[in-house]
Image (cartoon, rainbow, N blue to C red):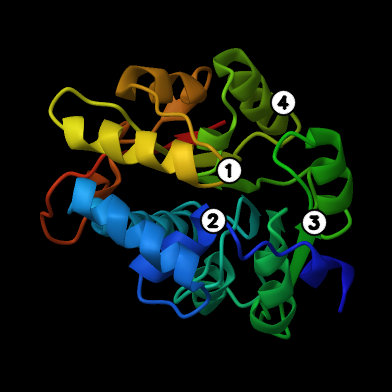
Amino acid sequence: MTDIESRIDTSRPHTARIWNYWTGGKDNYPVDREAGDRIRELHPGIGDYAKADRLFLGRAVRYLAEQEGIRQFLDVGTGLPSADNTHEVAQRIAPDTRVVYVDNDPLVLAHARALLVGTPEGRTDYLDADLRDVDTILDAASKTLDLSQPVALMLLGVVIFVEDDEESYTIVRRLMDALAPGSHLVLSHTVTHPDMPDVDAAVAFWNEHGTPKLTQRTPAAVARYFDGLELLEPGVVSCSAWRPRTPTPDVAMYAGVGRK
């Protein structure tokens, strides 16, 4: 058994595996499926959040690669590999794109070795690091990415695991400060919203039974992550409402894209 495999805990449900279950994946365990079903009972639409977030990723990466000419992506909090991962979307448009994935979940890392393989023209790499390890992330990523050129920083559904507000804003700011002008921040975050009270109940259940615990923030608090950046239209909105091809219902996962 490798060091990474020895860190996989199948006795408690885990966020990445539950999201994998909700999106139809097979990289999960009975404990994850049981928790996922219980959360869906509390909030029947929550499984749609994972799918909406994945679709948002695809639209954002496609826009950045096609319209902004971004050829470097730093994807922190990757989650379990699924259909249309960041490198797949970007390298279909520009095969020479370079992508670095960052996660500290052992199951994610075990799958990354086998599944996160890019084009021969580009490069795909992955790092075992926590979002809070900003210096480690930047130092290791610089071995694959040229940080003097624009980079898209992808933070989808990961800042929610930093409980302290100011610490979370500082982490995002430090990462963006290290990137060149023309870089972009792509961020999504679970929100608390008066129109969606059942979301709060689902999050409370998760924080009691699952790992790691997550923090909800208001849409206005999510918008603060983009302070100092040029926030692209339509701003910070439900991720299902960020430039969709067809209108879809809002979900309590808000997202935005900002340009440095």
Query: Which label number is shown at residue 174?
Result: 4
Q: Residues within 10 Å of mark 4 (few under 14, many from 20)?
A: few
Question: Is residue 62 visible from the viewing direction of this image?
Answer: no
Q: Are marks 4 and 3 in contact (CB under 8 Å)?
A: no
Question: Image quadrant for the C terminus?
Answer: top right
Q: Secondary structure at mark 4?
A: helix
The quarter of the displayed image where residue 171 is located: top right
Task: Compute the Cα span from label 4 to label 2.
Answer: 28 Å
Dividing the image into 4 quarters, which one contains the N terminus? bottom right
Labelled disc at residue 8: none
What's the mark number on residue 128? 3
**Callout 4–callout 2 Cβ contact below 8 Å:** no
Residue 162 at least partly seen: yes
Crowding at dot 1, Cα within 10 Å, few <14 / some 14-19 / many 20+, comes out as some
Q: Secondary structure at mark 3?
A: strand
Up-down relation of residue 201 to residue 84 (above or below):
above
Query: Are the residues at dot 1 and dot 2 in contact (C-beta closer than 8 Å)?
Result: yes
Q: Secondary structure at mark 1?
A: loop
Q: Residue furthest top?
A: 166
* Residue 184 position in % (x across, y down): 55, 40
Q: Is residue 127 left or right of residue 247?
A: right
Q: Amino acid at mark 3?
A: Asp
The image quadrant of residue 138 is top right
Residue ID for mark 1: 212
| Mark linked to residue 14 | 2
